[in-house]
Structures are given as structure tokens and as C-alpha cells.
Amino acid sequence: MITDQQYARVVIVGYKDRVSANAACAELRKKAGFADAFVRPLT
């Protein structure tokens, strides 16, 4: 996790596809401080 004054970057791997990652992200967005979470493929 990388943090600065305004953002925290968290990389979580292990989802079999983007649909699974989006579903997990939707649950994460329900938690305080994660409303702006999004899924992005690693390059």
C-alpha cells in the first residue's frame, strides 16, 4: 500500500476475472474511505 496526503493505493491480486474483481470492489466501496475504489488491470 502506498499512501500520501490524499490517496491510498492498494493492489490486490488473485481474482480469476474482471467480473470477480468488480464484484469484490463493489463490496469494498461500501466501507468507509473506499467509495472511490476502482478496478484496474495490472500492466
Image (cartoon, rainbow, N blue to C red):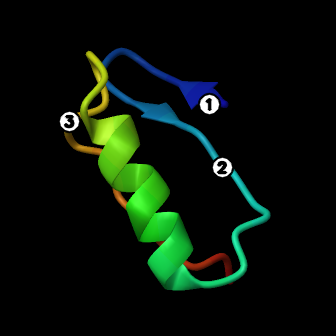
Q: Give the residue type at disc 2.
A: Val
User: In this picture, is 15 found above or below 12?
Assistant: below
Which residue lies at the image location 52% right of the left edge and 67% below the top edge?
21
Image quadrant in which the N terminus is located:
top right
Q: In which quarter of the image is the C terminus?
A: bottom right
Q: Looking at the image, is mark 3 or mark 1 earlier in the sequence? A: 1
Q: Is residue 39 visible?
A: no
The reply to whether discs 2 and 3 touch (Cβ–Cβ < 8 Å) is no
> How far is disc 2 from disc 3 in space, using C-alphas?
16 Å
Residue 14 picture quarter = bottom right
Q: Mark 3 or mark 1, which is nearer to you? A: 3
Cα–Cα gap, marks 3 and 1: 18 Å
In-front residue for pair 23/39: 23
Q: Residue at x 57, y 79 (%)?
A: 41
Earlier along the polypeptide chain: callout 2 or callout 3?
Answer: 2
- The residue where tag 3 is placed is 35
Q: Mark 1 to mark 2: distance in Å?
A: 9 Å
In the image shown, does 24 or 33 lie closer to the viewer? Answer: 24
* Helix, strand or loop at mark 3: loop
Element type where label 2 sits in the image: loop
Can residue 1 be seen?
yes
